[in-house]
Image (cartoon, grey):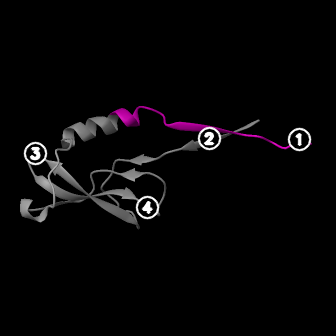
Amino acid sequence: MKEQETSLGLNLTSLRQPDDYQECLVYSPCEGFMVATWKNLGDEPGFYLFATYEPLHHEQTLFWAVLPTPEDMSELCRQLMTTKIKAIKNVDQPST
């Protein structure tokens, strides 16, 4: 049996915007609702967190939801960075 290893990249940067990205609505108690570039789709594997924030007026939102604060999200990311993410898949090799 042969093992295959897959890694997941997590990029905590706002220095580079991926070529293909997705935006999501985030909420902060201080800034309110904002649109954030958070995930790359067709670029190198990984997630781009805390990229560009664009403040939104409360009347521009369709619904309200309490989300973690930026500090809570930063702490979660720090915890993820200290944990190695690894997936191993067993692949049967043909007999020779």
Camera-nearest label, 2 or 1: 1
Mark 3 secondary-structure assignment: loop
Q: Earlier in the sequence, mark 2 or mark 4?
A: 2
The residue tagged 3 is: 29
- Measured in 3D between alpha carbons, the distance from the residue under mark 2 to the one under mark 1, in whole angstroms, is 22 Å
According to the picture, the residue beneath numbered tag 1 turns out to be 95
- Tell me residue 54's x, y (percent): 17, 62
Contact flag, marks 3 and 2 (Cβ < 8 Å): no
**First of labels 4, 3 by sequence position:** 3
Label 4 to label 1, Cα distance in Å?
A: 38 Å
Magenta segment boundaries in residue numbering: 79-96
Name the amino acid, label 1: Ser
Label 4 Cα crowd, 10 Å radius (few <14 / some 14-19 / many 20+): some
Q: What amino acid is at disc 4?
A: Leu
Residue at the far bottom in the pictured view:
19
| Place of residue 30 in the rendered image (x, y in percent of width and height, measured from the top left) | 8, 47
The three-letter amino acid code for the residue at tag 2 is Glu
Disc 2 target residue? 5
**Badge 2 element:** strand
Q: Which residue is mark 4?
A: 41
* Badge 3 density bin: few <14, some 14–19, many ≥20, Cα 10 Å: few
Task: Identify the image quadrant of the N terminus.
Answer: top right
- Crowd rating for badge 2 (residues with CA inside 10 Å; few <14, some 14–19, many 20+): few
